[in-house]
Amino acid sequence: MTTCPYGRTMLVGLVAVAGLMGLPWQAQTAPTFLGPTPYLSFVDSPFNVSGFTYFYLETFEDGVLNTPGATASPGWTVLNPDVFTDSVDGDDGTIDGSGTSGRSFYSSGSQTSVTITFNAAALGGNLPTHAGIVWTDVGNVLSGTSEFGDVTLSALDAMSLPLGSLTGTTLGDGTVSGATAEDRFFGVTNAAGILSITISMNNSIDWEVDHLQYGFADQTAVPEPATLTLCGLGTLALLGYNWRRKKGAQL
Ligand SMILES: [Ca+2]
Ligand SMILES: [Ca+2]
Ligand SMILES: [Ca+2]
Protein backbone atom coordinates (compact mmCIF):
# COMPACT_ATOMS: atom_id res chain seq x y z
CA MET A 1 0.00 0.00 0.00
CA THR A 2 1.29 3.43 -0.86
CA THR A 3 1.78 5.49 2.25
CA CYS A 4 0.83 9.12 2.43
CA PRO A 5 3.33 11.20 4.37
CA TYR A 6 0.59 12.74 6.47
CA GLY A 7 -0.61 9.74 8.41
CA ARG A 8 -4.17 8.88 9.27
CA THR A 9 -5.57 12.25 8.38
CA MET A 10 -4.52 11.85 4.79
CA LEU A 11 -5.84 8.33 4.66
CA VAL A 12 -9.26 9.81 5.38
CA GLY A 13 -8.69 12.29 2.57
CA LEU A 14 -7.64 9.57 0.17
CA VAL A 15 -10.69 7.51 0.90
CA ALA A 16 -12.90 10.52 0.37
CA VAL A 17 -11.27 11.37 -2.95
CA ALA A 18 -11.38 7.73 -4.10
CA GLY A 19 -15.09 7.78 -3.41
CA LEU A 20 -15.53 10.91 -5.51
CA MET A 21 -13.65 9.26 -8.38
CA GLY A 22 -16.10 6.38 -8.51
CA LEU A 23 -13.57 3.65 -7.81
CA PRO A 24 -15.00 0.24 -6.99
CA TRP A 25 -15.42 -1.05 -3.52
CA GLN A 26 -11.82 -0.85 -2.41
CA ALA A 27 -10.01 -4.14 -2.28
CA GLN A 28 -8.39 -3.68 1.09
CA THR A 29 -4.98 -5.12 1.82
CA ALA A 30 -6.78 -7.43 4.20
CA PRO A 31 -9.49 -9.58 2.64
CA THR A 32 -13.02 -8.29 3.13
CA PHE A 33 -16.16 -10.41 2.99
CA LEU A 34 -19.43 -8.81 1.89
CA GLY A 35 -23.00 -9.94 2.52
CA PRO A 36 -25.25 -11.71 2.75
CA THR A 37 -27.36 -8.94 1.22
CA PRO A 38 -30.69 -8.99 -0.70
CA TYR A 39 -30.24 -9.30 -4.46
CA LEU A 40 -32.88 -9.07 -7.19
CA SER A 41 -30.63 -8.00 -10.07
CA PHE A 42 -27.04 -6.89 -10.69
CA VAL A 43 -28.09 -3.41 -9.59
CA ASP A 44 -27.99 -4.81 -6.05
CA SER A 45 -24.37 -5.96 -6.31
CA PRO A 46 -21.72 -4.04 -4.32
CA PHE A 47 -19.56 -4.60 -7.39
CA ASN A 48 -21.94 -2.61 -9.61
CA VAL A 49 -19.46 0.25 -9.87
CA SER A 50 -16.91 1.60 -12.31
CA GLY A 51 -13.15 1.22 -12.17
CA PHE A 52 -12.53 -2.44 -12.98
CA THR A 53 -9.85 -3.45 -15.49
CA TYR A 54 -12.06 -6.44 -16.27
CA PHE A 55 -15.36 -7.64 -14.86
CA TYR A 56 -17.50 -10.64 -15.77
CA LEU A 57 -21.05 -11.53 -14.76
CA GLU A 58 -22.31 -15.06 -15.40
CA THR A 59 -26.11 -15.13 -15.28
CA PHE A 60 -26.34 -18.70 -16.69
CA GLU A 61 -29.00 -17.42 -19.10
CA ASP A 62 -27.09 -18.86 -22.06
CA GLY A 63 -27.29 -22.30 -20.45
CA VAL A 64 -23.62 -22.71 -19.54
CA LEU A 65 -20.92 -21.31 -17.28
CA ASN A 66 -18.64 -19.85 -19.93
CA THR A 67 -17.35 -16.50 -18.73
CA PRO A 68 -13.55 -16.33 -19.17
CA GLY A 69 -11.13 -17.74 -16.63
CA ALA A 70 -13.65 -19.39 -14.29
CA THR A 71 -14.17 -23.12 -13.78
CA ALA A 72 -16.67 -24.76 -11.46
CA SER A 73 -16.07 -27.92 -9.49
CA PRO A 74 -17.82 -30.99 -10.95
CA GLY A 75 -21.42 -32.02 -10.41
CA TRP A 76 -23.22 -28.71 -10.97
CA THR A 77 -25.67 -28.15 -13.81
CA VAL A 78 -27.63 -25.26 -15.23
CA LEU A 79 -31.39 -25.39 -14.62
CA ASN A 80 -33.61 -24.17 -17.45
CA PRO A 81 -36.79 -22.19 -16.79
CA ASP A 82 -39.13 -24.33 -14.70
CA VAL A 83 -41.54 -24.02 -11.80
CA PHE A 84 -38.72 -25.16 -9.48
CA THR A 85 -35.96 -22.99 -10.98
CA ASP A 86 -34.79 -20.08 -8.85
CA SER A 87 -32.85 -17.63 -11.01
CA VAL A 88 -31.97 -14.12 -9.89
CA ASP A 89 -35.27 -12.29 -10.30
CA GLY A 90 -34.32 -9.76 -12.97
CA ASP A 91 -32.83 -12.29 -15.41
CA ASP A 92 -36.23 -12.90 -17.02
CA GLY A 93 -36.59 -9.18 -17.68
CA THR A 94 -39.01 -8.46 -14.87
CA ILE A 95 -38.41 -8.00 -11.17
CA ASP A 96 -41.66 -9.55 -10.01
CA GLY A 97 -40.76 -11.79 -7.09
CA SER A 98 -40.20 -14.81 -9.33
CA GLY A 99 -37.09 -16.42 -10.80
CA THR A 100 -38.81 -19.37 -12.48
CA SER A 101 -38.45 -17.92 -15.99
CA GLY A 102 -34.68 -17.63 -15.69
CA ARG A 103 -31.82 -20.07 -15.24
CA SER A 104 -29.74 -20.99 -12.21
CA PHE A 105 -26.79 -23.20 -11.24
CA TYR A 106 -27.91 -26.30 -9.36
CA SER A 107 -26.24 -28.73 -6.96
CA SER A 108 -27.85 -31.61 -8.87
CA GLY A 109 -28.86 -33.60 -5.81
CA SER A 110 -25.22 -34.47 -5.17
CA GLN A 111 -23.19 -31.45 -4.05
CA THR A 112 -22.95 -29.56 -0.74
CA SER A 113 -20.56 -27.00 -2.23
CA VAL A 114 -19.29 -25.49 -5.42
CA THR A 115 -15.82 -24.05 -5.89
CA ILE A 116 -15.16 -21.56 -8.65
CA THR A 117 -11.46 -21.48 -9.53
CA PHE A 118 -10.02 -18.55 -11.45
CA ASN A 119 -7.28 -18.77 -14.07
CA ALA A 120 -5.05 -15.70 -14.14
CA ALA A 121 -3.63 -16.56 -17.58
CA ALA A 122 -7.14 -16.45 -19.03
CA LEU A 123 -7.79 -13.12 -17.30
CA GLY A 124 -4.98 -10.99 -18.66
CA GLY A 125 -2.53 -12.23 -16.04
CA ASN A 126 -4.45 -11.02 -13.01
CA LEU A 127 -6.58 -13.04 -10.62
CA PRO A 128 -9.77 -11.20 -9.63
CA THR A 129 -9.61 -8.82 -6.69
CA HIS A 130 -13.39 -9.02 -6.31
CA ALA A 131 -15.53 -12.16 -6.53
CA GLY A 132 -19.09 -12.96 -5.57
CA ILE A 133 -22.06 -15.22 -6.14
CA VAL A 134 -25.75 -15.16 -5.30
CA TRP A 135 -27.46 -17.89 -3.30
CA THR A 136 -31.04 -18.27 -4.50
CA ASP A 137 -32.70 -21.35 -3.00
CA VAL A 138 -32.60 -24.52 -0.93
CA GLY A 139 -35.11 -27.36 -1.17
CA ASN A 140 -34.62 -30.75 0.46
CA VAL A 141 -32.20 -30.89 3.38
CA LEU A 142 -30.00 -33.54 4.94
CA SER A 143 -30.65 -32.14 8.42
CA GLY A 144 -32.62 -29.35 10.03
CA THR A 145 -35.71 -27.72 8.54
CA SER A 146 -36.63 -28.38 4.93
CA GLU A 147 -36.02 -25.36 2.65
CA PHE A 148 -33.75 -23.63 5.17
CA GLY A 149 -30.03 -23.79 5.93
CA ASP A 150 -26.76 -22.02 6.62
CA VAL A 151 -24.76 -20.75 3.64
CA THR A 152 -21.00 -20.15 3.80
CA LEU A 153 -18.70 -18.37 1.38
CA SER A 154 -14.97 -18.99 1.71
CA ALA A 155 -12.04 -18.06 -0.52
CA LEU A 156 -8.39 -18.80 -1.18
CA ASP A 157 -5.64 -16.37 -2.12
CA ALA A 158 -3.15 -16.79 -4.96
CA MET A 159 -1.06 -19.13 -2.80
CA SER A 160 -4.09 -21.29 -1.97
CA LEU A 161 -4.14 -19.97 1.59
CA PRO A 162 -7.54 -19.27 3.23
CA LEU A 163 -8.79 -15.69 3.08
CA GLY A 164 -11.53 -16.41 5.62
CA SER A 165 -15.23 -17.10 5.36
CA LEU A 166 -18.67 -15.63 5.89
CA THR A 167 -21.81 -17.53 6.92
CA GLY A 168 -25.42 -16.51 6.53
CA THR A 169 -27.56 -18.47 8.97
CA THR A 170 -30.94 -20.03 8.34
CA LEU A 171 -31.39 -18.69 4.83
CA GLY A 172 -34.53 -19.75 3.01
CA ASP A 173 -38.18 -18.91 2.54
CA GLY A 174 -39.93 -22.23 3.02
CA THR A 175 -40.75 -22.69 -0.67
CA VAL A 176 -39.11 -24.17 -3.75
CA SER A 177 -41.21 -22.25 -6.23
CA GLY A 178 -38.70 -19.67 -7.36
CA ALA A 179 -39.46 -16.82 -4.97
CA THR A 180 -36.69 -14.25 -4.79
CA ALA A 181 -37.05 -12.15 -1.65
CA GLU A 182 -34.64 -14.39 0.26
CA ASP A 183 -31.92 -14.41 -2.43
CA ARG A 184 -28.60 -13.24 -1.03
CA PHE A 185 -25.29 -11.93 -2.41
CA PHE A 186 -22.01 -13.21 -0.93
CA GLY A 187 -18.68 -11.67 -1.97
CA VAL A 188 -15.05 -11.17 -1.10
CA THR A 189 -12.36 -8.66 -2.02
CA ASN A 190 -8.60 -9.11 -1.77
CA ALA A 191 -6.12 -6.71 -3.33
CA ALA A 192 -3.54 -9.46 -3.87
CA GLY A 193 -5.96 -11.64 -5.79
CA ILE A 194 -8.48 -14.44 -5.29
CA LEU A 195 -7.70 -17.91 -6.61
CA SER A 196 -11.07 -19.43 -5.78
CA ILE A 197 -14.34 -19.00 -3.96
CA THR A 198 -16.43 -21.77 -2.45
CA ILE A 199 -20.07 -21.48 -1.48
CA SER A 200 -21.46 -24.30 0.59
CA MET A 201 -24.50 -25.65 2.43
CA ASN A 202 -23.59 -28.41 4.83
CA ASN A 203 -27.20 -29.55 5.18
CA SER A 204 -28.28 -29.80 1.54
CA ILE A 205 -27.50 -31.22 -1.89
CA ASP A 206 -30.60 -29.54 -3.35
CA TRP A 207 -29.89 -25.85 -3.71
CA GLU A 208 -29.15 -23.16 -6.28
CA VAL A 209 -26.87 -20.21 -6.95
CA ASP A 210 -26.72 -17.60 -9.72
CA HIS A 211 -24.86 -14.46 -10.85
CA LEU A 212 -21.26 -15.51 -10.46
CA GLN A 213 -19.30 -12.27 -10.78
CA TYR A 214 -15.64 -11.34 -10.60
CA GLY A 215 -13.36 -8.52 -11.59
CA PHE A 216 -9.92 -7.01 -11.22
CA ALA A 217 -9.33 -3.51 -9.91
CA ASP A 218 -5.67 -2.55 -9.81
CA GLN A 219 -4.99 -1.08 -6.38
CA THR A 220 -1.29 -0.49 -7.05
CA ALA A 221 -1.44 1.34 -10.38
CA VAL A 222 -1.52 4.87 -8.93
CA PRO A 223 1.91 6.40 -9.65
CA GLU A 224 3.67 8.44 -7.00
CA PRO A 225 2.96 11.90 -8.51
CA ALA A 226 -0.72 11.10 -8.70
CA THR A 227 -0.60 9.81 -5.16
CA LEU A 228 0.85 13.11 -4.02
CA THR A 229 -1.89 14.90 -5.92
CA LEU A 230 -4.45 12.76 -4.17
CA CYS A 231 -2.84 13.60 -0.84
CA GLY A 232 -3.07 17.27 -1.74
CA LEU A 233 -6.69 16.94 -2.73
CA GLY A 234 -7.33 15.05 0.45
CA THR A 235 -5.76 17.89 2.41
CA LEU A 236 -7.93 20.46 0.67
CA ALA A 237 -11.03 18.33 1.12
CA LEU A 238 -10.30 17.89 4.77
CA LEU A 239 -9.50 21.57 5.30
CA GLY A 240 -12.66 22.51 3.45
CA TYR A 241 -14.68 20.19 5.58
CA ASN A 242 -13.20 21.58 8.79
CA TRP A 243 -13.67 25.15 7.55
CA ARG A 244 -17.33 24.58 6.76
CA ARG A 245 -17.87 22.83 10.02
CA LYS A 246 -16.29 25.67 11.99
CA LYS A 247 -18.14 28.25 9.97
CA GLY A 248 -21.37 26.38 10.58
CA ALA A 249 -20.64 26.41 14.28
CA GLN A 250 -20.39 30.16 14.20
CA LEU A 251 -23.76 30.66 12.53
CA1 LIG B 1 -38.49 -12.36 -12.47
CA1 LIG C 1 -29.99 -16.60 -14.01
CA1 LIG D 1 -35.16 -17.79 -3.97
Image (tube, rainbow, N blue to C red):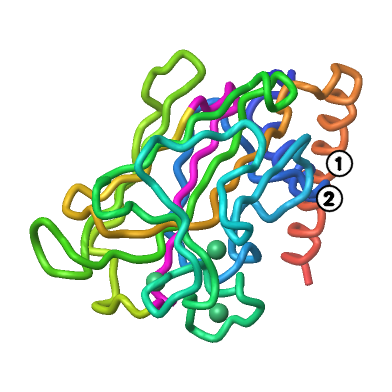
Residue at the image point whose x is 75% and y is 40% from the top: 52
Q: Position of residue 96 (x, y in %)?
A: 55, 86
Find the magenta span and give its range.
Answer: 178-195
Q: Is residue 229 magenta?
A: no
- Kindly identify which numbered label has been placed on residue 228: none
Q: Secondary structure at mark 2?
A: helix
Residue at the image point whose x is 31% and y is 59% from the top: 207
- Ligand 1, what quadrant? bottom right
Quadrant of res 181: bottom left
Marks 2 and 1, how far apart in space? 6 Å
Q: Which residue is mark 1?
A: 236
Front-most of 162 and 122? Answer: 122
Say whether residue 179 is visible.
no
Q: Which residue is mark 2?
A: 240
Q: Which SS type dominates the magenta stretch?
A: loop
Name the amino acid type tagged 2.
Gly
Residue extending furthest toward the top: 159
Cβ atoms at labels 2 and 1 below 8 Å apart: yes
Q: Secondary structure at mark 1?
A: helix
Q: Is residue 180 magenta?
A: yes
Q: Is 234 drawn above or below residue 242 in the view shown?
A: above
